[in-house]
Amino acid sequence: MTITAAPETPAGPPVRYLLPAEAYFSAQWYEREQQLLFPAHWALIGYATDVQSPGDWYVGYCGATPVVLCRDSEGALRAFADPDDSISASQPTRLMAADCAGLTECAVDTWAGVIFAHLRPETAPPLMTWLGTFPSEAFVGLFPFEDLVGIDRTQWDLDCNWKFYIENHIDIYHLWYLHEKSLGNFDHHGLTCRSTGPHWSCVEAAKDPTLARRESLPRIPGVTDVEATLIRANLLFPNVPWTSTSGNAVTTYQVIPTGPETCRLDFRLRAVPGSVISDEDRANGRQILYAEDGYACEQMQRVVRAPQFGVGPLAQVHERPIMEFHQNLLTLLG
Amino acid sequence: MTPYPPMQGAPIQHGWTLAGSASALDRPGSFVTCESGLTPMLVVRGQDGALRAFVNMCRHRGMALLQGCGETGKSITCPYHAWRFDTTGALRVIPQRATQFPGVDRADWSLIPGAVAELAGLIFASAEPSAPALPDLLPVAWTESDEAAARAEGAAGTFELEFPGPGERVSSRLTVDVRQQQLVAVATTGSPAGYHVSVGVGCADEADLASTLVRVRAGLTVDVSVPQHEELSV
């Protein structure tokens, strides 16, 4: 489905906020999500570059559950749920699948140099089926993803439920106001949204293409001139924003639930090998994702326990993705 | 030196909580924030000079509108989506209303009112708009006197106040748990005879504030150091 951000006549039933306040602070909701939501989906748990050689290991997350990723002696990827975080605690120099005896093995697959795991192999659909048309030009653009390497990683702890951050990510309406300066060079009225299954995407162009580039990073080879003027913001349901900016960087920032009212952003930026992000560009990213978006989410968390908490009418088009996100959650959580 | 007894007593009921000092709200547009139970509150002096308390929540997405204390001018604008309220709580602006919010009546989405009271130079607020009058809830009469006036600019958290005893320059300590701000008012009656202490700790913006002024009935006025944010055991 494709939606243009500024139709002349908004149509359809009113856009509503569907989740109750408890969904953002109760331990019961949190546990239900860990039991019913996250195990029902493939989760981005790392990159091929995290485990390049036999014995390499890495810990990613499916919801709040640690998943240990390793590469066995034949070069095959293996993944194991490690709810007690025992592997991280022991910090082995090398890790093989045989060292994970006692842990529950997950399904594991890759796309675009990204490694996904599924906590329930017996019910996991093929990864590409689950991704739908997400791996396409319309969603993520035409990038040589497998040629990119991680050049920057930052983790931010936030005092908010993980869903507030995801809702912020798919909220078009806030771009004009919360990011009035930091994203002021992008044409939000020309923004286009799409969805495939539970996944979501939007793309918009720079008003002034000369200001769109992240100057400290080189253009990724093969990326078109048009792509170099775009910013893309996607969501791999339920908790992995995937963005690209100006044809020179692709980022994921998994929003890891760390408690009913806390989460951690694991921001990973991929670009051309050997490139180095400048302090200024890193600061700009921090400003948008943490100082602005993180602030807004924490300010909602401050209020959500109040008996008076309530959400009013939502923007008919610009906040519709939030209602659809809620619908996708409620399909599993009831 | 006789140590002060630990503060005891029931919290003030019906959500009344110390919001700040009257001096922090002496101009139109000045505001303070506080918590009434689980409800974040804001108190603002309107352009008409009236004090009003509201739930500190934008009616659109539920975001807290204001932090700490300061000046908000003639309106309160939500930083998230720029919904704008005036200082009477009325919703004045919904950006892109014609295309994004067809049929939405601004009058339905005013700020949620609370109750506000001024007592002994301190401002109290409650999330209950029809809360019983504050003086009726205090364990003993709280008489407003010159000596009882206090200017409060403290920080959220737990810290110790030092102030001299009557007629002697001896420091005594009184621990104030600002997270339980109701206790601050009770402390007024829990102090030894002769000490009627008003302590205002209404501003949660630790970074901007460094001292608290305490005035006791004996007429002694002292500046009280407040630990920096990092030192507070919140």
Image: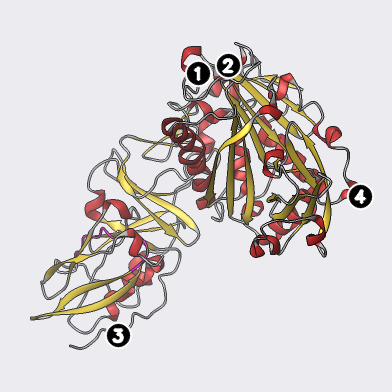
Q: Are marks 1 and 4 in contact (CB under 8 Å)?
A: no
Residue B154: in magenta span: yes
Chain of the residue displaying label 4: A
Q: Residue A310: x, y in percent? A: 58, 46
Q: Is residue A54 left or right of residue B86?
A: right
Quarter of the image containing the N terminus of chain A?
A: top right
Which residue matches tag 4? A122
Q: Are marks 1 and 4 on the same chain?
A: yes
* Percent position of residue A250, x then y: 61, 29
Q: Which residues are magenta?
A: B149-158
Give whichever of discs 1 and 4 has the lower sequence position.
4
Are dots 4 and 2 on a single chain? Answer: yes
Q: Report x, y in % for residue B37.
A: 48, 62
Q: Secondary structure at mark 2?
A: helix
Q: Is residue A280 above or below residue A136?
A: below
Categorize mark 2 by other alpha carbons within 10 Å: few (<14), some (14-19), many (20+). many
The disc labelled 2 sits on which kind of residue?
Ala
* Residue that lies at the very extreme toward the left in this rendered image: B167
- The kind of residue tagged 1 is Ala
**Mark 4: which amino acid?**
Glu
- Marks 1, 3 in one chain: no
In this figure, which residue is indicated by the disc labeled 2?
A228
| Residue B146 sits above or below residue A213 on the image | below
Is the residue marked by circle 3 packed among few (<14), some (14-19), or many (20+) residues within 10 Å?
Answer: few
According to the image, label 3 marks what residue?
Answer: B5
